[in-house]
Image: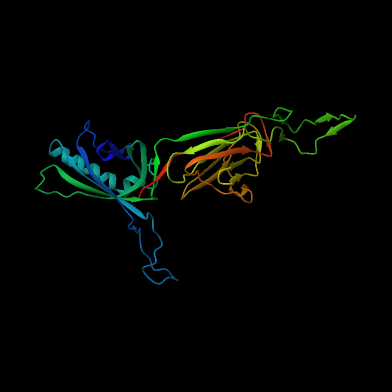
Amino acid sequence: MSIYDSSTIGTAGNLIRFNDDTGTPYYRMRSRTPSRRELREFEAVLPEGSGINDTTSYIGKMYMVLEGTMYPDDENGFHEGREALRRLASLEVSQDDANSDNGYVLYKWDENVGKQLPVKVLYADMSENTRFGIKQPFRLLCKIKYPAIQSQQVKTQTLGISTVGQLGGLQIPAAVSMSIPSTTGGTTYFPMTFPVVIGGTTSEGQTAVTNDGDLDTWPTIVIYGPVSKPKITNVTSGEFMELDINLASSSDSAIIAYDQDSLSVVASGVNVYGKLTTGSSLFKIKPGNNDLTFTGATLGVGSQAIINWRDSWPLS
């Protein structure tokens, strides 16, 4: 059972290891219990509300209690271990940690695969009781941002092109005027403004992106040029994301990253969220196989989209 295996909570500089006999003090995990009780950050009377029962913030609709026993080698180890628990539960310390998400840190354990859950440790309950000597029980009250367990491993899939137009996916610079001889004599000119990406408009077909979990999960998508009006389609769900932008070369990229409480759509360092076309949706990767395609109004050689995601499971 994973509760008997080694697990960690916190960040590199503020970390507690459970069931790890290589260090001291030894923190033995005894139980972990998720609950659906809502934790309120604060209460306030709202101008148009019915009173104190209306709250401005329900941050974390679940919490988890981690219970264990600390086994120090001596009295100094007891004090050091208790200080470590208090430091882990200090919001001032955790929120000032560059590796935490506003105080949320990762609780990591193994359960057939490595899993993790972002939690915020609000309180370390550890009394001094002569019944137990220096071997004292403790409880960590942890607020949960959203009840979804994720894999520690990030999965990656690349969507690239396999066919391009007869110009080989070249990008034509603005200074070049271009024409193609007509088959009936004379010259045929392109009715377009340069620079523009010339190439194929198809992807290499449907590529399977597999979520081995039981919950929908959020992807991060990185698109590399040359491509104009790039579009990622989840054929399985019928949803798509399309950006009305032009990534002129392979050094140009767009990054689409989002989850339950954050969103970033950036191209070459510029916010392009407003460039999402009508009908676009920030879709999730559903459990099982998701067939994705990468297309564009024009695609050049080397253009690709990289999909990153973590498998996801329900907490309870």
Q: Position of residue 143 (x, y in %)?
A: 33, 51
Q: Is 117 positioned to the left or the right of 240 in the image? A: left
Q: Nearer the viewer, residue 102 or 263?
A: 263
Q: Residue at 64%, 29% (x, y): give it.
A: 162
Q: Nearer the viewer, residue 257 or 239?
A: 239
Whether residue 259 is visible to the viewer of this picture, yes or no, is yes
The total number of labels drawn is: 0
Residue 164 vertical placement versus 193 (above, below): above
Q: Is 57 positioned to the left or the right of 15 in the image? A: right
Q: Position of residue 230 (x, y in %)?
A: 63, 40
Q: Quadrant of residue 153?
A: top left
Q: Residue at 20%, 34% (x, y): give it.
A: 24
Q: Residue at 59%, 42% (x, y): give it.
A: 233
Whether residue 96 is visible to the viewer of this picture, yes or no, is no
Q: Nearer the viewer, residue 280 or 133?
A: 280
Q: Position of residue 90 (x, y in %)?
A: 29, 48
Q: Is 188 positioned to the left or the right of 263 in the image? A: right
Quarter placement of the N terminus: top left
The colour scheme used here is: rainbow
Q: Position of residue 40 (x, y in %)?
A: 35, 59
